[in-house]
Amino acid sequence: MRRLAEALYGVAIALWVGGLWAIGYLAAPTLFAQLPDRMLAGRLAGEMFGWMAWAGFVCGGYLVVFLAFRQGWRILRLLPFWLVLTMLALTAAGHFGIQPVIVQLKLAAGARDVLESAVRDRFAVWHGVASVVYLIESLLGLLLVAVQERGRA
């Protein structure tokens, strides 16, 4: 059972961090480059980011539980624990805080492209905030991959 838990630890990190990079830096840009309808591309990208957030909650939750059972109170001194906790916080902020604002701005634009509407500037600011939060989470994920063995010791 211990080997399965350790294997799932590595799989959870791979799925979460790999998914962040695949969706954010491959799939979403490809949608905007290939689809003629930017609104459709945005809807599809948003859907993928939403699914990725839920995958992050599941993977991050497992990682916290694994580390807690494996390390006990020593967890508080482990870099992987703090990376996972920070990534979970960023995921929650993005999914439950920033994304709803972006959705509301799109709704305020109505049938028009949000970039051609009166809320364009506010949308650009919030989209920028979302992008920075996602970039920080992605970079923390790379660091987590690099230091993941510290959580198993």
Image: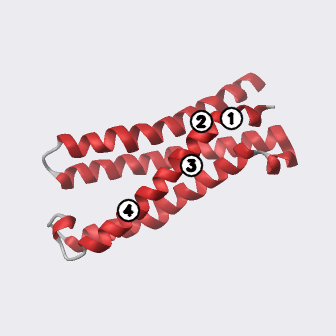
Q: CA distance from mark 4 to mark 3?
A: 23 Å
Q: Position of residue 133 (x, y in %)?
A: 48, 57
| Total residue callouts | 4
Q: First in sequence, mark 2 or 4: give its number.
A: 2
Callout 3 crowding tier (Cα within 10 Å): few <14, some 14–19, many ≥20? some
Q: Which residue is mark 1?
A: 148
Q: Position of residue 29 (x, y in %)?
A: 29, 44
Q: Which residue is mark 4?
A: 128
Quarter of the figure with residue 86: bottom right
* Three-letter amino acid code of the residue under disc 1: Gln
Q: CA distance from mark 3 to mark 2?
A: 12 Å
The local secondary structure at tag 1 comes to loop
Q: Are marks 2 and 4 in contact (CB under 8 Å)?
A: no
Q: Does residue 92 appear in the picture of this structure?
A: yes
Say if 21 sits above or below 50 in the image: above
Seen at 25% across and 75% down, the residue is 119
Seen at 70% across and 43% down, the residue is 80
Q: CA distance from mark 1 to mark 4?
A: 30 Å
Which label is found at residue 57? Answer: 3
| Apparent side of residue 112 relative to residue 42 in the rendered image (left or right) | left
Q: Residue furthest bottom?
A: 118
